[in-house]
Amino acid sequence: MIFNNKLIYLKFLYNFLFILSLIIFFFSTTKVFGKSFNIDNIEISQPFEINFDKNGVIDKGFKEAFFELISLIVNSSDTKKINQVKLHEIKGMVESFSIKEEKFINEIYYVNLGVSFNKKKVFNFLEKKNIFPSIPIKKKILFIPIIIDESRKDLLIFSDNKIFTEWNNHIEKFHLINYILPTEDLEDLNILKKNFEIIEKYDFKEIINKYSLNDSIIALFFKNDKDLRVLSKITLKKNMVIKNQSFLNIDLQNDENIEKIIYDLKTIYEDYWKNSNLINTSIKLTLSIQVSNKDSKKISNFEKKLNETSLIYNHFISRFDKDFVYYRIIYNGTPNNFLKSMSDMGYNFDTQNKFWILK
């Protein structure tokens, strides 16, 4: 009898200590919500006068950080719907902020802020505005701009082309596309001149294949006396589209005209890239995942990947026992999209039951 009582006591003690260790592990290392949107290096300055208000400077930083975030994840045509956002709405989406640096120089206060926005709250805000955000993915793209002088039957590329030389001098913090310009190559120039008469139909493979990039934009600038027509062949994710733009009364020797062309084209290309990575926040798929608790490192890495997955709207631990941890995941996509994205990161599941089991 005494032996049985001891056995019961030991089992109780074991279960208590086991559950306690799980509580300490999960609630000290786990984020309840997915990854935040982090905006760094927001620089604000203001004269240090009698009515100086540091909180007002911080609020100004919140606004600037928010609109930088919007420029990262929202199509340019949709940003107009957000211009009148109130400060209290922005502050309601701020999860945390940090002052990276502050200093006074010549009676001017300078501050560098980092601001984290709660992803779930940002998505809710945009959904109410009927705006679908996109995943802010950086992308390297080969960009080949060619000016075709129709009156002289000639083309300009490399250093003779002002679009080429100025293109990467106009970069914004919120730009997602990193443009890789081709190196000056006499052979490439000869290839283009050889195909001058069929330049619109030419596939450019001889030139593109020299670079280890799958995505490219070929921009053909057809110039006459006053106007400019731009034909862009955009190849992303193995799909090619053609876009046409016209610029009236353009002088390619005028710096302001060049700046406008570059700004407008980069906006078009950025929007196209964002549209290919849209998140349908109206889809909220609930997934139940079961993970063995025998390997704490595996659990920690799995949680880290959940935090890094942009389409995950929310995730949390619904319960746990001595054998398994049970997750509830809210996903802005289809089950197949989730399984593929997780498989790409090395995580596969047995999906035969209500709770999918992480293998």
Image: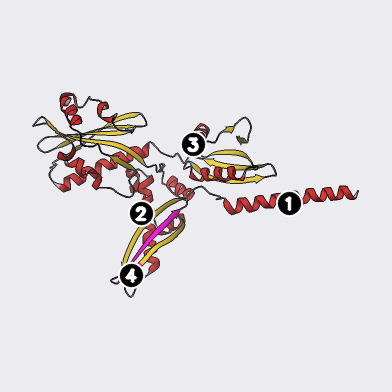
Residue hosting label 1: 16
Query: Real-space Cα distance between discs 1 and 2?
Result: 54 Å
Residue hosting label 3: 333
Determine whether, in the image, residue 131 is placed left or right of residue 266.
right
Q: Which residues are magenta?
A: 103-117
Q: Is residue 188 above or below residue 2?
A: above
Which amino acid is tagged 1? Phe
Query: Real-space Cα distance between discs 3 and 2?
Result: 30 Å
Disc 3 or 4, which lies upstream in sequence? 4
Magenta stretch encompasses residue 115? yes
Residue hosting label 2: 84
Residue hosting label 4: 104
For marks 3 and 4, give the one nearer the viewer. Answer: 4
Q: Position of residue 4 (x, y in %)?
A: 87, 47
Query: Real-space Cα distance between discs 4 and 1?
Result: 56 Å
Q: Is residue 84 above or below residue 164?
A: below
For marks 2 and 4, give the one nearer the viewer. Answer: 4
Count of numbered labels shown in the rendering: 4
Q: Is residue 213 above or below residue 301?
A: above
Secondary structure mostly seen in the magenta stretch = strand
